Image (cartoon, rainbow, N blue to C red):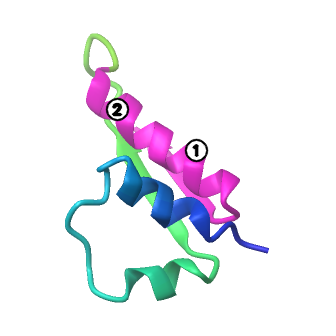
Amino acid sequence: MLDTTFFTDLKNRGIAYQYTPDIEKQLEKQTTFYLGIDPTGDSLHIGHYFGITILKRAYQAGHKIILLAG
């Protein structure tokens, strides 16, 4: 069963400020989240951390995730 508080939590934290209409209906089903990171830089930065954190929250809410580092 999917955690329906996932998107509500993102909105409450101000992370999902502008979004596609009816996205909440899509997130009631299992959805795949994708994040690609280019590891050629000297270090990871806050932008990487932010994306990874959202991916973690999506996974905990029952969604599938794809993390690509390459």
The percent coordinates of residue 68 (x first, y second) are 47, 46
The percent coordinates of residue 53 (x first, y second) are 48, 38
Element carrying mark 2 = helix
* Residue lying furthest left: 18
- Identify the image quadrant of residue 44: top left
Determine crowd level at label 1: few under 14, some 14-19, many 20+ residues with C-alpha closer than 10 A. some
The percent coordinates of residue 67 (x first, y second) are 51, 47
Element carrying mark 1 = helix
Q: Amino acid at mark 1?
A: Lys
The residue under the point 51% across, 49% down is: 55
- Identify the disc placed on residue 56: 1
Quickly name the residue at label 2: 48
Determine crowd level at label 2: few under 14, some 14-19, many 20+ residues with C-alpha closer than 10 A. some
Cα gap from disc 1 to disc 2, whole angstroms: 12 Å
Give the magenta range: 45-70
Front-lying residue, 26 or 66: 26
Instruction: Describe residue 64's horizontal placement relative to residue 8 as left or right.
Output: right
Task: Compare marks 1 and 2 and give the one earlier in the sequence.
Answer: 2
* Residue lying furthest top: 42
Instruction: Describe residue 19's horizontal placement relative to residue 6 as left or right.
Output: left
Regarding residue 69, the answer to whether it shows in the image is: no
